[in-house]
Image: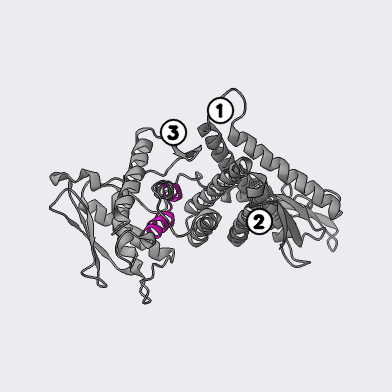
Amino acid sequence: MPDTRDVYAAEDLFAGWLDDASRAPGEPVRVRVGASVQAFEPEVEVRFSDPTAVQAYVDRVLAHLTAIASRYDDGAGLDRASIPVVVRARRGRSRAHYEYDELPLRGVMAIPPREVGGAWSLRAAVVLHELAHHLNPAEGHGREFRTTYLRLLEDIGQPVQADLLHTAYRLTGLDTGVDGEDRTLLRIGRLLRQAERTSNTAERDAFFAKAQALATRHQIALAVARATAGAEEQREDPAYETVLIGESGKRSLARYVRLVLEIARANDVRVAIYTSNTRVTLYGFPSDLAVVKALYASLVTQMVADGDAHLRSGAHKADQRQVWDARRRRWEVRPVHGSTARAAFYEAWADHVGERLAAARAQERAAAVAADAPVAEGPTSTELALRAKEVEVVDYFGRMQREHDIRGTWKGTASAAQAAPGSRDAGTRAAARARLGTERAIDQPR
């Protein structure tokens, strides 16, 4: 099989980087790709004590794939993620392998135990390699296998590890089927779908943060590429796109616009807002526009769901205000109206999510700048590329404002936070229940 040797070489690189990360927790792994150095902070790799622990892990991974409805079709309508895998101890110590003989009843994974010298195989990088064989109907280590392995890492909430593995494949000259911007947007979309499907708030928040971090890394790479390419090679120019927020008269449109603004700020996109709040026009690089649209479509769904849950709980009734009763001709204390509570909840939710997206962006930018050591005192090439990109977007937006006669400043609507402080605080809590980017997507042993 022609690709096997190169795949093993790439995955040896990948395993070495994970070892580096485990030896220096909290320190980024720096990898030279062409003329640039990229910084990665991979998720913690799981290690195992014996094949029994491997079996428990494999069972959880397959259950997770089923729970998030991520199908691995065998080409005949059968989801291979629904087929169990039995882990057995292997007598030899030199290799692990996957056995197809008992399919479609079950797959078999053979892992050498520690007692025969198999400690090297008792790690997730090896186990997930064998599981990718189970999920991929084509035998061998061709492009389909590599794409399956990358997708598996993303599906279990390990997008940075997937990035590292993808980099190792590229450095070894291997194709993974989908590269560049299309692959990035697919991965962001997959993370957002996982966020929408999970009922765990902490897990959902982690997926959102990882999606923003991935988007930022992609934006930095494109900015550096634009700065170093000749004018005739630049493949992307700023553009604009109008997005429907809602029909005229629908409640909470201004709060939805507020959410768009927070997402746009974290992704180098400028926004022009229709006076009716029914539409916004996004200005920026096409890849960034796509990220903003994807994030908004997912986040607004979650914001509304959280707001509905808050109102159903009745907690908003704790906020009260004085209302004049014309019939009784006196002031009475009553709970705030549900629409006021919802508005306060949405405002706080959007503001706090915006802060968390901005934090994820700042962390990725700082890591990229730190990895790009300057040759002399002064800004790095990455910093210069990012500034050039920002200037280009600002100049483009200014030109479009003049050409399209865009005037005035969006004032939003009157804040509901003071009228419903309890709902405001609930909105903040709903957007901040997790430590961003550190949770594991499935219950993993250490």
Query: What kind of residue is marked 3?
Result: Glu
Nearest the eye: 54 or 10: 10
Which residue bears the numbered disc 2? 317
Query: Where are the magenta residues, as a range?
Result: 146-164
Which is in the foreground here, disc 1 or disc 3? 1
Q: How many marks?
A: 3
Q: Identify the mark nearer the N-term, 1 or 2.
A: 2
Closer to the camera in the image, 198 or 289: 289
Disc on res. 302: none
How far across and how far down the image is residue 188, in percent?
A: 53, 55
User: The N terminus appears in which quarter of the rendering?
Assistant: bottom left
Measured from the top left, where is residue 248 in percent x and y?
78, 67
Q: Which mark is residue 374?
A: 1
Q: Mark 3 points at which residue?
A: 27
Query: Quick one: SS at disc 1?
Result: loop
The answer to whether 187 appears left or right of 293 in the picture is: left
Q: Does the magenta stretch include residue 161?
A: yes
Q: Residues within 10 Å of mark 1 (few under 14, many from 20)?
A: some
Give the CA distance from mark 1 to mark 3.
19 Å
Residue 155, quarter of the rendered image: bottom left
Q: Give me the residue at 63% from left, 41% from top.
A: 227
Along the polypeptide, which appears first: circle 2 or circle 3?
3
Decide whether the magenta segment is chiefly helix, strand or loop. helix
Circle 3 Cα neighbour tier, 10 Å, few/some/many (<14 / 14–19 / ≥20):
some
- Tell me which label, 1 or 3, sits earlier in the chain: 3
- Disc 2 residue type? Lys
